[in-house]
Amino acid sequence: MAINLVKGQTIDLRKNDKGETFDLSKVTMGLGWDVRKKNTGFLGKLFAPKEEEFDLDAIAFLLDGNDKILNLGRTVNQNGRQVGLFEGDVIFFNSMRHPSGNIWLTGDNRTGAGDGDDEQIIVKLDSLDPIYQKIIFVVSIYQGRQNNQHFSMVENAFIRAVDANGKEITRYSLSGDASLNGMCTMVFAEAYCKDGGWKFRAIGEPYQTDSFLEILKKYVNA
């Protein structure tokens, strides 16, 4: 049975306290959320302007033993504009697969082991180069500041880890409340290497920015 975490709690991904073991050769980090529906009544629904759709993006940072990004990637031309962080240690919508092939972003996926996930980041933890000691998982609301969208409008948000055999290892859930008003980015969780194994920690740290680049700065050498 999967372990439901609380903020700040850490578990071992390989083996839980009940003696269950998990295959970390391919781990799916599934992220999901629902947008809270406004209760405006019949007339409100009839005459209210159409709301902007929420576009939430999953991002992963691969860090070394000093909590730093080793490779910021290169800049490429996409649709007539210069886009950075391509094929580096940041996995996001413009660079969905790590050069090693050991971690990638699938985007929307509602089938198989990931049923119910809105986005998935898949990582082959057993194959990851030992130089990478930590992975941070972030969710950001695209243009959240511009559209006045924030995590207090989001409910039933979660991140979960599913092993190579489709067994859910752990899950961390949170629902938006007034404390998340104006917060457009969330550092959900991290997986980190310790004593030769992988641990998973629930973080749930919100930020006002809607750009994960602002979060990334703290992990880049000056």
Image (tube, rainbow, N blue to C red):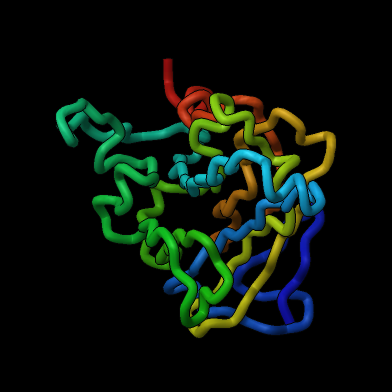
Tally the numbered discs: 0
- Foreground pick, 184 / 161: 184
Residue 192 percent coordinates (x, y): 57, 52
Residue 79 percent coordinates (x, y): 17, 35
Say if 206 sits above or below 170 in the image: above
Residue 41 percent coordinates (x, y): 81, 51
Q: Kindly identify the residue that appears in the image at 15 percent across and 29 percent down.
A: 80
Q: Kindly identify the residue that appears in the image at 45 percent across and 59 percent down.
A: 121
Q: Quadrant of residue 195?
A: bottom right
Q: Quadrant of the N terminus?
A: bottom right
Does residue 212 show up? Answer: yes
Say if 125 sits above or below 157 in the image: below
Residue 31 percent coordinates (x, y): 57, 59
On screen, residue 7 versus residue 129, left or right, reads right
Q: Quadrant of the C terminus?
A: top left
On screen, residue 59 versus residue 156, left or right, reads left
On screen, residue 22 versus residue 132, left or right, reads right
Spot the residue most to the top: 222
Does residue 8 show up? Answer: no
Q: Quadrant of residue 169?
A: bottom right
Q: Quadrant of residue 123?
A: bottom left
- Foreground pick, 37 / 196: 37
Q: Kindly identify the residue that appears in the image at 26 percent across and 35 percent down.
A: 73
Q: Kindly identify the residue that appears in the image at 30 percent across and 51 percent down.
A: 98
